[in-house]
Amino acid sequence: MQKFSVEQGLVVPLDRANVDTDAIIPKQFLKSIKRSGFGPNLFDEWRYLDLGEPGKSCEDRALNQDFVLNQARYKEATILLARENFGCGSSREHAVWALDGFGIRVIIAPSFADIFFSNTSKNGILAIKLDEHVVNDLFDAVEKTKGFQLSVDLDQQIIHLPTGETLSFDIDPFKKYCLLNGLDDIELTLQHADEIEQYEKTRKQQAPWLFS
């Protein structure tokens, strides 16, 4: 998993509440369990005018020019600004894979669905909860300022605004540790590879019939 330290990037505003995981990555793309390749199909039904299918190239598909991610001013954005209850619906990890594949490194919203929120840190994305009035102010600033960027410092738990002002945010210490060190569940386990190997050797000696 990619380490997260500081992300300075363009902000794209998704001004919709209760965005569910089926909107983030539609159900037909769940056939694959690979963790990569979902970026082109992020918000597929909103980004394109035709129906997307697994294995179908997105290069020649007609774009919905009214959708915010297709607007030139937000090209290559890495910070997603969203409304309340982002990531609700079914608990598909593919939704986070799609955001990561698109290049989103930070999501800022007043609230997140619990399982989606848990999946973000396990896949290298920093999800930040801020008070609704603060998020409203950010939406206003993004609309008024073309090329609006934020700098998000995970270690200091501070968001730097273009005005020089800062916003602080809370994060679970364990999630913070994993993000800073680029550790997902598997990589956390592999930190104890030597102990696991030694246990298996000892266990084979103690109970060889279990391994026959």
Image (tube, rainbow, N blue to C red):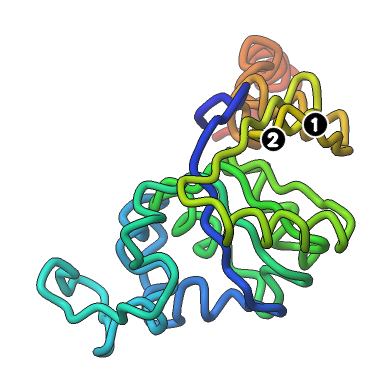
Residue 53, x across and y down, in percent: 26, 81
Judge the density around disc 2: few (<14), some (14-19), many (≥20) Cα neighbours within 10 Å: some
Q: Is residue 210 left or right of residue 7?
A: right
Residue 200: image quadrant is top right
Number of numbered tags placed on the structure image: 2
Name the residue: 70% across, 48% down.
Answer: 127
Tags 1 and 2 touching, CB below 8 Å: yes
Q: Is residue 164 left or right of residue 1?
A: right
Which three-letter amino acid code belongs to the residue tagged 1?
Answer: Thr
Q: Nearer the viewer, residue 165 or 36?
A: 165
Question: Does label 1 or label 2 sit earlier along the sequence?
Answer: 2
Q: Nearer the viewer, residue 2 or 47?
A: 47
Residue 149: image quadrant is top right
Residue 63: image quadrant is bottom left
Query: Where 94 falls versus 63 (above or below)?
Result: above
Residue topped by disc 2: 161
Name the residue: 38% across, 56% down.
Answer: 73
Residue topped by disc 1: 166
Q: Is residue 60 left or right of residue 42?
A: left
